[in-house]
Image (cartoon, rainbow, N blue to C red):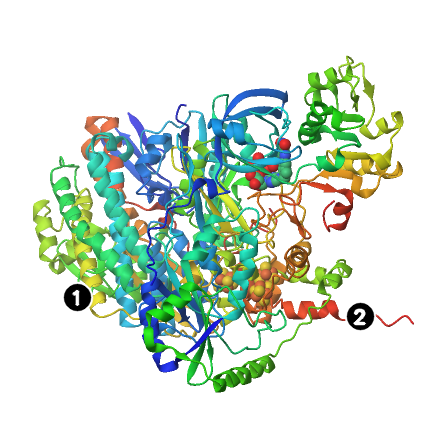
């Protein structure tokens, strides 16, 4: 991988050059929290942020998105839409890039999703490293570092950002700024290693994911799920903010006075009582406890079977977004806990 | 296909849902050309008050014998009866805490004369007649109303979200008032469809659309109590717009 | 020979009301403006509720005046707690009232009243021949709604106005968007004057009329002010709103859920015509020209002139709104949060001008900020006695022309008052 | 340096798996009061020729302006050019479909799902056990087997319905009774009409009348939950290995292509790894049955 470094005081200039590659969006502050937003000025960007309310998922799988337009005589046609719109997301954390790599698995496969794919092509990602806080456990989920899925990735090494060039587009960005980037010295590499080690030590949360799938199978009937079901409000916040939750619903809305209409997809959640409901009223996950169990099960067990790793990246968003303090780290710890005296 | 015969009626309420219909300025002329509007007292004076109707849209709740009789009459003449607005769907604001205390409230308000007034306990429409479709909201949302008419003209019931406001609040990426500021917000219990308008304005959801499917009121109550909201206020808040919600 | 002419259920008005006229030959025995809206008892129901919930519950008294109810309620609550809101909040509240006034007047003039003059049963029927006029009305209405949405967060039952201010002030982009609509509305309002100036006049027998309106501090406004001014046969009188009971004198009457108000034993009219009659001097040049174009002589004892008065207010409202939007844009609107509200025991009374006239909210709170008593007096309730006086006069005039003409006269007069019947259902404990 | 512009071509319909192709309803046959068979033919002749499916697969059927839902293909791939869908009126989309007439157009995309593992079944006996509407997905396999009769050893059809009037494709089924290349066993729970000359009794009772060779047989089962319960019992008692029992399962579905998450059970997607599962899969997936 091509690795360079950028003097920190040149970041502003670099950002101004990057505009030619698309509309720049970055975290900005909103009443004490952060959101990815279109910048009107570079000074609005907050690159030292904890986590955004919504992950970058919102750009690739928008909460509500028209998929097809139907007109009598013409059939179903994809709307002109904005999938080709070029954006640059500036300041994406490693876990969020990792989460996109996970979504890539889902939206590729036998039936690649053209809307997602087009956006993935047209939205550039400039990653940035971060300092874990009390809700982060990406280290445990092996998502504290990413080696692909971005165009550029910046790591703070004091006076410079060590810059990983992850794509041809990223290389173009570097080349467009000509002399800004410098070559990396052995001292820079040492500094990177020191900081990376310090970051590794800085995590306050730890989850052991070894044999979690097996534990999930064994604890399928655990009373934990009943307790969680009694607590959970089925509000859907956790899945909305989760960078790897992708369930969606598809609905048609007719144009007044016509059969013409728009078929759109909207975020859905496995926590909703309608998620597994079928015609005639049968509901495969009627109880709230079966639904919250499913969310955890699918992330930590089902996804592993399907794609070889859990779909959680440890970003901590669901912990911050749950009104009744349901905490994935605590749930996983409780599942692992031994509660019975040894029999022999 | 002949145009469906339609009527729009108001029982006791604030007329907000009928006003929302009149507020569909961009669609109004289309709406009235697609429907054969036979009976719409708030907007027309040449109403046919007897004809059979394909669709009756009824706003307001039942608060008097007169309301009850009108509603029953509307039901008789209509193939499909649509409850519009939280009063019609849930009883609405004026139904809260009314039942049981009616005599006292009347006395207090009108003095002894109040006893002669035609006032009854409050009922949501479905408690009196069969309701075919419910469009909730205080008032209803324009886009949900227009979508309902568009669907019904094609013979389909409209599809509305059943999940709570929190999900729409997240879709808008608003800050969470409940979590960040401990402000009692009814978002987790209230059915979405409003686009989480209030939290986007930094104002807590007051539940004007009534409960979401499978709302977990007990857990919400415990959560609010833990944040120090007095039980009395929690109870009132959660029941402001949907006093019939729990039992119906 | 005695007979009864009855309009069972008034059409094209908000809420449920009727008119009953008892005649003996051409002599009018009695005239009753009946209100049979179901009793909603909202003032009773807010008892014990915290101040945070009061405005949103009481705005549900009436959708068409929901801004007026919501904001007047806040004004009363803030007055009880001694809360001073920011100047920007006052301006935004004014704007919110203007939006409601534009929406309400456009709705009434084009969709409810105009069909009367042009002899159509509804605006729907009228649209077939007068599509442009209906579209113009809808455009103005939509603008009024856009203002309410921008400032209040929603057109019906605003959500953004809260104790102490607004949840979130509109941003510059929203204001620029409003300005675009307002520039079109200036022309539309002028056209409205043309339309109403060209209508056949509607004349019924008159009766000497008294008026009451909010004394606005300087401009022709609906929100600011604490005094109520009366104009009775050329004489004026003013009262601070805290003394509103002296002229509300509510009496429950058997045929109606609304109560009747008198000032010194006389009914009085509130609403657009009353405001113009008392505040004509505060109108802008453009609005004053509209008064002349419409041939409106002020004060006017013809209740039908209330329609013209609303048309004048449309001109004035659009102009004032544009002025406010521009000044907010010039001054860079601030992202304010509401001023802190600390409850205390006490009473607060507020008065404002709803589109249909004076609106009074008065509350007593306990020290925790819970309602002890709430009293809401609405324009349609204030107008009820005046409506009956005008109906009686017109009935006397129209009786010889037959029952149909009489009914039509009754309907047109009631409609000219633009009554809002759900509003008028006023329920209060009399001390 | 590369130029990045906004001029990339719009999404190509062919590359869009959400894109339904329009098809005409060429025939509607009433089966039961709430069940009809819709015969569809694509408007586009190249689609007519290129559309190929396996028995047990399904399509996503769109009613313009209303919505979309998964429906099994009831016709056999051996009888191409048309698609037969046997649909029960259950909710919004299906009710809308029932209001359509011949010549109306609908949208179809697919085929989706794994279908029956016909290559594995080849050379074995095939037992089809259908209850009620369960005939809809099995009919495709039935005709596939009959039209490729040489590929299979014995073919046994067991079909049970509530009454003779509730039997789907009744004439077709009765006509099979006379054939000697298939053991067609039909039964009804009851016969209010009195005109039924065949067996009366529940579907599982048919097992009393056959000798099976479990080690060389694949059983394909489809029907309401009771059918699964008792038929599975019989099959296991007969000594069927759990991976020789095939069943078609239903889950809520929105996309049909493994994206929307609704049909996920445990760690499988009904639309991709299903809807045909072995009984072994089924008991190993939580919530599956
Ligand atoms: C693989 C598969 C094959 C099927 N084959 C047939 C068939 O051959 N004939 C037949 O009549 N029915 C079949 N069904 C069931 C059929 O899909 C439902 O009856 C249908 O979705 C009901 O849609 P609706 O809009 O009428 O009902 P509503 O209750 O209004 O459902 C709304 C939406 O929810 C989803 N949904 C609801 N019920 C189901 C369900 N049971 N399965 C999947 N999605 C559902 C759909 O997206 C549907 O559009 C099959 C289902 C699956 C999964
Ligand atoms: S499950 Fe929670 S911690 Fe894991 S990726 Fe999703 S939001 Fe982040
Ligand atoms: S955020 Fe919490 S309460 Fe809401 S659905 Fe998720 S787990 Fe349940
Ligand atoms: S602010 Fe209210 S609606 Fe929004 S997420 Fe929080 S609790 Fe839910």
Determine which residue is flagged by label 2. Answer: A339
Q: In front here: C272 or B177?
A: B177
Residue B20: image location, x then y, percent? 37, 45
Give left or right: position of C402 versus B94: left
In the orientation shown, which residue stands out farthest toward the top? D195
Subunit under mark 2: A
Relative height, residue C342 to residue D178 (above, below): below
Q: In front here: B121 or D87?
A: D87
Q: In front here: B88 or A43?
A: A43
- Based on the displayed image, in which of its 4 quarters is residue D271 positioned? top right
Q: Mark number for residue B204?
A: none
Give left or right: position of B239 versus C181: right
Q: Are marks 1 and 2 on the same chain?
A: no
- Based on the displayed image, in which of its 4 quarters is residue C66 positioned? bottom left
Give left or right: position of D115 versus B25: right
Q: Secondary structure at mark 1?
A: loop
Instruction: Characterize the local packing of mark 1: few (<14), some (14-19) or many (20 or more) Cα atoms within 10 angstroms.
Output: few
Residue D57: image location, x then y, percent? 63, 36
Is residue D147 visible in the rendered structure shown here?
A: yes
The span from disc 1 to disc 2 (Cα, nearest Å) is 76 Å
């Amino acid at each position: 991988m091509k690795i360079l470094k950028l003097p920190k005081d040149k970041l502003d200039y670099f950002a101004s050059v990057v505009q030619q590659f698309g509309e720049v969006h970055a975290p900005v502050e909103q009443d004490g929290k952060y959101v990815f937003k279109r910048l009107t000025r570079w000074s609005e960007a907050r690159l030292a942020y904890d986590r955004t309310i919504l992950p970058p998922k919102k750009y690739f799988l928008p909460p509500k998105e028209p998929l097809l337009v139907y007109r009598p005589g013409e059939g179903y046609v994809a709307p002109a839409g904005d999938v080709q719109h070029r954006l640059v997301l500036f300041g994406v954390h490693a876990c969020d890039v990792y989460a996109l790599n996970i979504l890539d698995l889902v939206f590729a496969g036998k039936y690649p999703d053209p809307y997602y794919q087009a956006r993935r092509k047209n939205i550039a990602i400039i990653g940035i490293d971060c300092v874990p806080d009390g809700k982060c456990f990406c280290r445990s989920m092996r998502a504290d570092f990413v080696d692909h899925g971005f165009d550029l990735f910046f790591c703070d090494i004091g006076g410079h950002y060590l810059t990983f060039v992850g794509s041809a587009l990223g290389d173009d960005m570097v080349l467009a700024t000509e002399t800004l980037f410098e070559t990396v010295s052995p001292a820079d590499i040492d500094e990177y290693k020191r900081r990376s080690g310090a970051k590794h030590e800085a995590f306050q949360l730890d989850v052991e994911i070894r044999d979690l799938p097996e534990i999930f199978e064994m604890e399928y009937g655990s009373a934990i799920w009943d307790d969680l079901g009694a607590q959970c409000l089925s509000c859907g916040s956790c899945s909305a903010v989760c960078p790897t939750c992708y369930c969606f619903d598809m609905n048609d809305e007719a144009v007044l006075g016509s059969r013409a209409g728009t078929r759109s997809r909207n975020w859905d959640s496995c926590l909703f009582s309608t998620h597994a409901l079928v015609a005639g009223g049968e509901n495969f996950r009627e109880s709230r406890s079966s639904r919250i169990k499913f969310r955890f099960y699918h992330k930590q067990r089902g996804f592993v079977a399907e794609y070889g790793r859990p779909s959680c990246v440890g970003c901590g968003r669901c912990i911050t977004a749950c009104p009744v303090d349901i905490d994935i780290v605590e749930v996983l710890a409780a599942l692992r806990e031994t509660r019975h005296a040894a029999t022999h | 296909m002949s145009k469906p015969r339609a009527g729009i009626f108001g029982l006791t309420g604030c007329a907000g849902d009928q006003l929302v219909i009149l507020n569909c300025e961009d669609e109004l002329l289309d709406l009235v050309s697609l429907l054969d509007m036979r009976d719409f007292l708030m907007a027309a004076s040449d109403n046919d008050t007897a004809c059979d109707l394909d669709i009756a849209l009824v706003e307001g709740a039942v608060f008097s014998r007169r309301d009850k009789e009108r509603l029953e009459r509307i039901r008789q003449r209509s193939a499909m009866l649509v409850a519009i607005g939280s009063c019609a769907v849930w009883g609405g604001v004026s139904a809260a805490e009314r039942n049981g205390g009616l005599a006292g409230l009347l006395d207090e308000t009108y003095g002894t004369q109040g006893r002669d007034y035609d006032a009854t306990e409050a009922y949501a429409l479905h408690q009196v007649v069969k309701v075919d479709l419910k469009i909730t909201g205080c008032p209803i949302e324009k886009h949900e109303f227009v979508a309902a008419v568009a669907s019904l003209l094609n013979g389909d019931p409209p599809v509305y979200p059943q999940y709570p406001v929190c999900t729409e609040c997240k879709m808008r990426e608003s800050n969470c008032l409940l979590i960040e500021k401990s402000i009692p917000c009814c978002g987790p219990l209230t059915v979405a469809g409003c686009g989480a308008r209030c939290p986007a304005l930094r104002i807590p959801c007051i539940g004007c659309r009534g409960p979401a499917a499978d709302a977990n009121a007990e857990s919400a109550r415990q959560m609010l109590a833990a944040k120090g909201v007095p039980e009395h206020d929690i109870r009132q808040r959660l029941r402001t717009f949907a006093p019939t919600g729990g039992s119906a | 020979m005695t007979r009864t002419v009855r309009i069972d259920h008034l059409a094209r008005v908000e809420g449920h009301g009727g008119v009953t006229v008892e005649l003996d030959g051409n002599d009018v025995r009695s005239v009753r403006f009946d209100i049979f809206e179901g009793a909603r008892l909202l003032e009773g129901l807010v008892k014990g509720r915290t101040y945070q919930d009061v405005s949103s519950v009481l705005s549900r008294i009436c959708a068409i005046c929901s801004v007026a109810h919501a904001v007047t309620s806040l004004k009363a609550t803030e007055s009880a707690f001694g809360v001073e809101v920011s100047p920007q909040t006052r301006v935004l509240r004014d704007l919110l009232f203007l939006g409601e006034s534009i929406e309400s007047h456009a709705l009434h003039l084009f969709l409810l009243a105009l069909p009367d003059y042009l002899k159509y049963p509804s605006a729907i029927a009228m649209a077939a021949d007068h599509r442009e006029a209906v579209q113009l009305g809808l455009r103005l209405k939509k603008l009024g709604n856009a203002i309410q949405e921008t400032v209040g967060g929603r057109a019906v039952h605003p959500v953004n106005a809260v104790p102490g201010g607004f949840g979130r002030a509109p941003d510059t982009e929203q204001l620029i968007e409003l300005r675009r609509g307002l520039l079109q509305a200036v022309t539309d309002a002028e056209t409205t004057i043309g339309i109403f100036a060209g209508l056949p006049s509607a004349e019924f027998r008159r009766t000497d009329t008294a008026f009451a309106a909010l004394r606005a501090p300087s401009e022709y406004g609906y929100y600011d002010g604490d005094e109520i001014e009366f104009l009775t046969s050329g004489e004026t009188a003013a009262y601070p709103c805290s003394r509103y009971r002296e002229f509300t004198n509510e009496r429950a009457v058997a045929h109606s859920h609304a109560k009747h108000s008198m000032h010194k034993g006389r009914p009085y009219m509130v609403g657009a015509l009353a405001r113009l009659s008392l505040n004509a001097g505060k109108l802008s040049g453009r609005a004053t020209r509209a008064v002349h174009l419409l041939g409106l002589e002020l004060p006017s004892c013809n209740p039908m002139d209330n329609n013209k008065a609303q048309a004048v207010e449309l001109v004035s409202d659009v102009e004032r709104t544009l002025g406010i939007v521009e000044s907010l844009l010039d001054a860079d609107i601030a992202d304010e949060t509401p001023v802190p509200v600390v409850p205390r025991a006490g009473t607060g009374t507020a008065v404002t001008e709803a589109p249909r006239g004076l609106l009074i909210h008065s509350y007593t709170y306990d020290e925790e900020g819970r309602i002890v008593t709430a009293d809401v007096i609405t324009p349609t309730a204030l107008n009820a006695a005046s409506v009956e006086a005008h109906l009686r006069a017109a009935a006397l005039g129209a009786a010889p022309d037959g029952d149909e003409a009489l009914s039509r006269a009754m309907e047109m007069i009631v409609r000219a008052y633009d009554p809002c019947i759900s509003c008028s259902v006023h329920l209060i404990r009399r001390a | 340096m590369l130029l990045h512009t906004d001029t990339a071509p719009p999404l190509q319909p062919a590359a869009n798996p959400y894109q339904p192709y329009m098809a005409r309803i060429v025939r509607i046959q009433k089966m039961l009061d709430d069940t009809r068979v819709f015969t569809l033919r694509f408007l586009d002749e190249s689609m007519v020729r290129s559309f190929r499916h396996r028995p047990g697969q399904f399509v996503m059927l769109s009613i313009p302006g209303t919505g979309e839902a998964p429906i099994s293909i009831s016709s056999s791939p051996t009888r191409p050019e048309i698609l037969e869908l046997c649909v029960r009126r259950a909710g919004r989309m299906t009710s809308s479909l029932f209001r359509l007439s011949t010549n109306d157009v609908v949208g179809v995309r697919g085929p989706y799902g794994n279908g029956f593992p016909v290559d594995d079944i080849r050379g074995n006996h095939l037992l089809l056990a259908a209850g009620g509407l369960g005939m809809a997905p099995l009919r495709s396999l039935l005709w596939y087997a009959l039209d490729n009769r040489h590929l299979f050893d014995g073919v046994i059809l067991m079909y049970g319905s509530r009454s003779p009037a509730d039997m789907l494709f009744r004439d077709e089924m009765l006509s099979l009774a006379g054939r000697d290349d298939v053991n067609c066993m039909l039964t009804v729970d009851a016969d209010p009409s009195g005109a039924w000359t065949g067996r009366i009794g529940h579907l599982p009772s048919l097992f009393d009348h056959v000798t099976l060779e479990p080690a060389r047989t694949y059983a394909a089962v489809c029907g309401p939950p009771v059918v699964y319960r008792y038929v599975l019992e019989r099959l296991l008692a007969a000594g069927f290995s759990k991976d020789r029992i095939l069943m078609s399962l239903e889950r809520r579905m929105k996309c049909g292509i493994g994206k929307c998450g609704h049909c996920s059970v445990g760690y499988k997607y009904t639309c991709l790894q299903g809807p045909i599962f072995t009984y072994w899969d089924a008991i190993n997936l939580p919530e599956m049955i």
